[in-house]
Image (cartoon, rainbow, N blue to C red):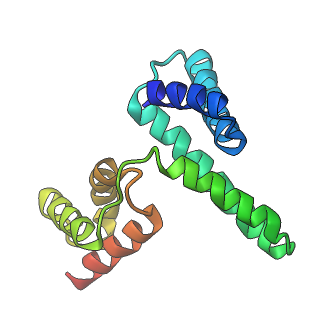
Amino acid sequence: MYEELKQDMITCMKEKKKLELSVIRMVKADCDRLKIDKKIELTDDVVMDVLLKQIKMREDAISQFQKGGRSDLVEETEKEIAVLKKYLPSPLSLEEVDEIIQQAIEEVGAKTKKDMGQVMKIVSSKVKGRYDMKKISSLIQEKLSEN
């Protein structure tokens, strides 16, 4: 994934795609900083964490821009999010997520909301970057309250 980012950065420079280039540079800089500061290898999981963090920051910024009535900044930030999302794996459908949650509940033997942490741990590792974790949390709560 990191190599793909580097290749896309070169392509964007050649094609003079300023928006994409600046977004990719930010992600690459965050990845490089992590590699140096924490002395870790840049795996796809590390790069995905950086991408998800960048998306979350931009989503938070959008809500602030909307409160301030800055539709121009909202539009630009949405374009940046679109650039970031193209590096994430394809999203899961609700049915697929439901199935993963059910498997995790059975695997852990979860019966009550007290078991939610164990279920969440299993589910989050399988759906990371492919589904909204807030929605996952509420789906798990629903399922555990049904039991």
Viewer-proximal residue among 141 and 72:
72
Residue 104: x percent and y percent? 19, 59
Indicate left or right for 13 with 124 as reference.
right
- Is 33 placed above or below 61 here? above
**Residue positioned 69% across, 35% down in the render:** 16
**Residue positioned 13% across, 57% down in the render:** 107
- Is 31 placed above or below 72 here? above
How many numbered callouts? 0
| Residue at the limit of the structure toward the bottom, as seen here | 146
Residue 49: x percent and y percent? 49, 41
Indicate left or right for 96 with 47 as reference.
left
**Residue positioned 47% across, 49% down in the render:** 86
**Residue positioned 66% across, 41% down in the render:** 23
| Residue at the limit of the structure toward the front, as seen here | 15
Indicate left or right for 58 with 47 as reference.
right
- Is 133 placed above or below 54 here? below
Viewer-proximal residue among 139 and 4:
4
Residue 140: x percent and y percent? 31, 71
Q: Quadrant of residue 9?
A: top right
Residue 36: x percent and y percent? 60, 15
Q: Quadrant of the N terminus?
A: top left
Q: Quadrant of the C terminus?
A: bottom left
